[in-house]
Amino acid sequence: MKRDRKLPNWRWEALRTTLWFMPAVLILLGAMVFIVTFKIDVAAYFHQIQLPSWLRSGSSQSGRDVLIAIAAAIITVVGVVFSITILALTLASQQFGPRMMRNFVRDVGNQVTLGVFVSTFVYSVLALGSITIYPHGDFAPHLSITVAESMLLVDVVVLIYFINHIASSIQLPAVIAGIARDLESAVDTEFPVIDDDAPPLSAREASALLQQPTVLLATIEERGGVVFAAKSGYLQFVGYAQLTKIAKLVDAVIRLDYRPGHFIVAGRPVAKVFPRGAAQQVEKALAKAHVTGPHRTLMQDPVFAIDQLVEIAIRALSPAVNDTFTALTCLDWISAGLSRISGRELSEHVYRDEEGRVRLIGADWSYPKMTNRAFDKIRQAAHGMPAVMIRILDSLTAVVEATTTATQRGVLLRQGEMVLRSANESVTEQNDLDEIQSRFKRLQECVSMLNAPDPA
């Protein structure tokens, strides 16, 4: 029995991929802090409370000068630092691909950095505007000025952190490792660990499972109504739970033809519904339960992280870059991700209602397709490159050791056979060819050992 999937909320994910949400929150927080400090300053001005002597900041004019200097310095730093950062990221994107800019926007540290600077600027401007003339003379918000100076010191620390963070994040190993972490997280979300200690099924649950999806699929294919896409774009999120409720409400079964990561075209079929009469209602619900956009995301789409690693690898193997070690690093992380996937059950997306009846059948995950996506393009780009071919075979062997079925091992062995054929055609140095054949033999032995029946 699987644990419930903890699917991310796409609205929250969309907010995370912006540079305005976190700064807006911190600006609001800074404004609230100013309201508190301003009220304390007013109370001190009218001698309702006594502030410590070390908070005194001189006359109102000197306080005005301090706040002007802080506001001017902060807004200048924000403009210069972020402009230089965008330039550095643009140059890095030429090697790593367009994901660099998206990762920069999505990074919480970058968002907080921008928010801290902007909130300090807003706080200083508000404090500057509070300096005025009251009946007892000029009003200087001593506490607010002191807080602004403290925020300036915090900004200096944040600036040092930001420079170090950017310098570290655009380094290639950090980029690749970050994508690999995203892959692990996506795999854990989409393919939960199987609970082997789950209690046995009750009679009612066992009876409900007799309603097999394979029979329903044949019925839907022959007699189902077609549902068409409302708009074009990459499918980013599917509300499976919402669609299951809709299907139960209209007493229907939905079969989805696409999964997150696929590109759908407006007016083209995206699902089928049985009975046919429920298609129109489901089409309206599907338009609300699907989220499409101009790009792919990692929500419900672990293959996207694999594609990102593959893209970096084939860019590195291009004649213009010729960075073999980057490709080898990508292969190492790809093997780690596929090993994690190989140990999970790629179950069909079948969703049932409270009574155990099948209501939604999603597009299946395919282990052969994921494996081919991971190795095909790299293998093709590595034609005539023994070092990369050897690392591909080593990666395949590592993944084989994590597999759970003979079918998975057959898919990986097929990749190894293609690597060997490519090596025989393109590698001219006999010693290199012998090494490649030796690694392939090791892969074969690992597959044979795991496929051998248990003597017990």
Image (cartoon, grey):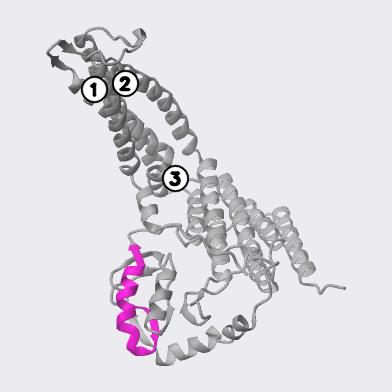
Residue 271 belongs to the span the image colors magenta: yes
Give the residue type that dot 2 points to: Ala
Q: CA distance from mark 3 to mark 1?
A: 45 Å
Q: CA distance from mark 3 to mark 2?
A: 41 Å
Residue occupying image coordinates x 76% and y 61%:
442
Q: Which residue is identified by label 1?
A: 127
Residue 268 visible? The answer is: no
Residue 417 belongs to the span the image colors magenta: no
Q: CA distance from mark 2 to mark 1?
A: 8 Å
Which of the pair 328/179 is nearer the observer? 179
Helix, strand or loop under label 3: helix
Query: Do callouts 2 and 1 mark residues in contact (Cβ within 8 Å)?
Result: yes
Give the residue type that dot 3 points to: Gln
Q: Residue 240 falls in which quadrant of the image? A: bottom left
356 lies left or right of 106: right
Earlier sequence position, callout 3 versus callout 1:
3
Q: Which residue is identified by label 3?
A: 95
Residue 59 on image: x %, y %: 22, 7
Which of the pair 228/430 is nearer the observer? 228
Image vertical order of residue 291 relative to residue 349, above or below: above
